[in-house]
Image (tube, rainbow, N blue to C red):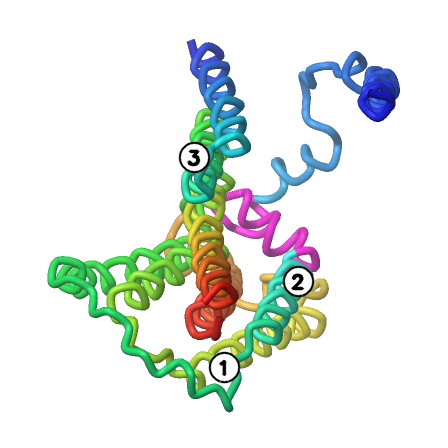
């Protein structure tokens, strides 16, 4: 009884504390100065039709690099916690084969989902979506294969090579921006091209493709270690 | 009109959140938690944020649900081992 009363008291205290935040909210009728600068100068400066992408990859590129690093650390953590015990021979039981319908559907759908993921990150500077979304779609294609062919193994050498190389090239392009353009992760190391075409917006498509490969391979790594781990 | 749709979706989100807490089986809770993300992604789409909507639909309702399902199957397996 006393416990419940105390909990209620704490909740009321929080409501009183947070009330000013809620009551002071005013609907914003105009953009703040920073957003206004992005909206005005973004298309001309960076040549990307999707303004969100130019903010994520170039203006806020360092934050995106941090996100990719966080994802990398998370994958490393999952892989470490769920590592396969080499000595356990208790696990040779055969996993049940999946049904014919699932296998045929997987064979039909997996390449299409892969293509869709690649489309999403290649067109990140033109249409909604980008590296992260494309990477997740690719990971879902691999997930479908893992579910329908439980015996199959992900090739870890290729996976790790994609992971490391895409991360390294991402940093390399960022450093190139320091020497050839205005700063770290500047996309104007390549010609901006025609606005709205596939080969435009400088290095944004390259960077977003690398992010897509990186995110996709990291998530495939997580799914693979969850599927493979004992117990 | 769009406000009404957003309010209805918000109420559905709260309802599925309560379902996720009070469902008997963990499997239903996981599915209900995925439904929250799906509804949230529709709201993002209505608020003209397609980038965020794609992210929420793919990660929130797709990948997270699968990871939870994997975790559930692992927990179940180890529980059976302890008893047997």
Quadrant location, the N terminus of chain B = top left
Is B82 rendered above or below residue A1? below
Label 2 SS: helix
For residue A32, above or below residue A45: above
- Callout in the foreground (3, 1): 3
Give the Cα distance between marks 3 and 1: 33 Å
Badge 2: how crowded within 10 Å, few (<14), some, or many (20+)?
A: few
Q: Identify residue for label 1.
A: A160
Residue B14: x and y in percent read 53, 23
Q: Which mark is residue B35?
A: 3
Residue A70, numbered circle: 2
Which chain hosts label 2? Answer: A
Query: Where is residue A67 shown, x and y percent of the image?
Result: 64, 58
Q: Nearer the viewer, residue A128 or A18?
A: A18
Residue found farthest to the front: B84
For the residues beneath circles 3 and 2, the answer to whether they share a chain is no
What percent of the width, then of the height, locates residue A8? Answer: 81, 19
Range shown magenta: A43-63
Q: Earlier in the sequence, mark 1 or mark 2?
A: 2
Whether A192 is drawn above or below A3: the answer is below
Q: Position of residue A79 (x, y in %)?
A: 57, 74
Provide the major secondary structure of the magenta segment: helix
- Do discs 3 and 1 belong to a common subunit? no
Q: Could you say which quadrant of the image residue A185 lies in?
A: bottom right
């Amino acid at each position: 009884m006393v416990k419940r009363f105390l909990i209620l008291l704490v909740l009321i205290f929080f409501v009183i504390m947070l009330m000013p935040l809620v009551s002071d909210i005013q609907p914003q009728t105009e953009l703040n100065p920073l957003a206004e600068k992005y909206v005005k100068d973004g298309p001309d400066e960076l040549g990307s039709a999707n303004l969100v992408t130019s903010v994520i990859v170039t203006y806020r590129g360092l934050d995106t690099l941090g996100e990719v690093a966080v994802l990398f650390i998370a994958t490393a953590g999952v892989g470490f916690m769920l590592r396969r015990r080499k000595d356990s021979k208790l696990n040779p039981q055969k996993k049940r084969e999946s049904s014919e319908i699932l296998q045929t559907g997987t064979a039909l759908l997996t390449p299409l989902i892969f293509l869709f993921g690649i489309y999403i990150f290649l067109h990140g500077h033109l249409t909604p979506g980008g590296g992260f979304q494309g990477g997740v779609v690719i990971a879902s294609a691999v997930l479908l294969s893992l579910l329908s062919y439980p015996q199959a193994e992900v090739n870890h050498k290729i996976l790790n090579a994609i992971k490391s190389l895409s991360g390294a090239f991402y940093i390399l392009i960022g450093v190139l921006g320091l020497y050839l353009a205005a700063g770290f992760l500047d996309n104007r190391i390549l010609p901006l091209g025609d606005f709205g075409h596939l080969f435009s917006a400088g290095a944004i498509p390259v960077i977003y493709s690398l992010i897509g490969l990186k995110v996709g391979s990291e998530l495939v790594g997580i799914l693979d270690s969850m599927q493979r781990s004992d117990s | 009109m769009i406000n009404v749709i957003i309010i209805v979706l918000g109420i559905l989100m709260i309802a599925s959140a309560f379902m996720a807490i009070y469902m008997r089986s963990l499997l239903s809770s996981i599915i209900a938690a995925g439904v929250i993300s799906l509804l949230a992604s529709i709201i993002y789409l209505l608020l003209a944020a397609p980038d965020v909507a794609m992210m929420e639909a793919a990660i929130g309702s797709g990948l997270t649900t699968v990871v939870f399902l994997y975790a559930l199957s692992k927990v179940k397996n180890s529980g059976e081992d302890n008893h047997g």
